[in-house]
Image: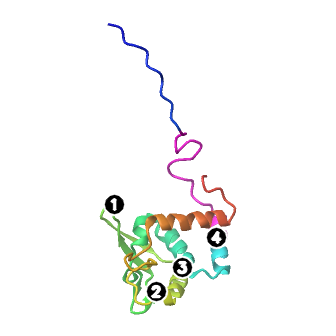
Amino acid sequence: MEAPNLPAFRALRPAWKKGRIVGQKRPLKTKHVWAIRVRLELAENHRDLALFNMAIDSKLRGCDLVKMKVIDVMASGQIKERASVLKSKTQKPVRFEISEGTRASVEKWTEDELMVGSEYLWPGRFHERLHISTRHCARIARDWVTSIGHEVRA
């Protein structure tokens, strides 16, 4: 019995990852980190500056960064010099030092009127959302990178 030759199927649209760099991206260089910090300071964007500085200091994943609570970094009205956060993937605590610049930016952010009564360090805009989403954090990071004229895909 002979099998008939079937026509080859073609995709109606190209693959979503065609032409994109998929996976881990190269880390930012020191000059890019300082360029982003200066832009955020000049724009007086306290939340983004505190989020950026905390991300650099802690080296946490986005999912762990957005779930940080105020009590993780603050004790008796002062920002701690060292903080400890439980990683969601490994369930292991990670301790990190909070630098002086990060402490200053987080202190300015906690004094903001949007932070009044918030349990989380990066509160969401809507009442059903306790903190910003990981996707929202990624969009913010993309905006930081494009603000210095860097290619987002690289």
Viewer-proximal residue among 6 and 95: 6
Q: Amino acid at mark 2?
A: Met
Question: Please, what secondary structure does the residue beneath circle 1 have?
Answer: loop
Question: Please, what secondary structure does the residue beneath circle 3 have?
Answer: helix
Tag 2 residue? 115
| Chain part drawn in magenta | 13-36
Tag 3 residue? 47
Whole-angstrom CA distance, mark 1 to mark 4, is 28 Å
Tag 4 residue? 36
- Label number found at residue 89: 1
Q: Nearer the viewer, mark 1 or mark 3?
A: 3
Q: Nearer the viewer, mark 1 or mark 2?
A: 2
Pointer 1 or 2: first along the chain: 1
Q: Amino acid at mark 1?
A: Lys
Residue that extends furthest to the right in the rendered view of this protein? 149
Judge whether residue 79 can be spotted in this image: yes
Whole-angstrom CA distance, mark 3 to mark 4, is 13 Å
Pointer 1 or 3: first along the chain: 3
The location of residue 50, given as percent across then percent down, is: 53, 78
Pointer 4 or 2: first along the chain: 4
Q: Amino acid at mark 4?
A: Ile
Question: Please, what secondary structure does the residue beneath circle 4 have?
Answer: helix
Viewer-proximal residue among 16 and 28: 16
Whole-angstrom CA distance, mark 1 to mark 3, is 25 Å
Whole-angstrom CA distance, mark 3 to mark 2, is 10 Å
* Label 3, residues with CA under 10 Å away: few <14, some 14-19, many ≥20: many
Please tell me which residue is depicted at 51% across the width and 52% down the height of the picture.
24
Whole-angstrom CA distance, mark 4 to mark 2, is 23 Å
The location of residue 127, given as percent across then percent down, is: 39, 80
Residue 69 among those drawn in magenta: no
* Label 2, residues with CA under 10 Å away: few <14, some 14-19, many ≥20: some
The location of residue 136, given as percent across then percent down, is: 49, 67
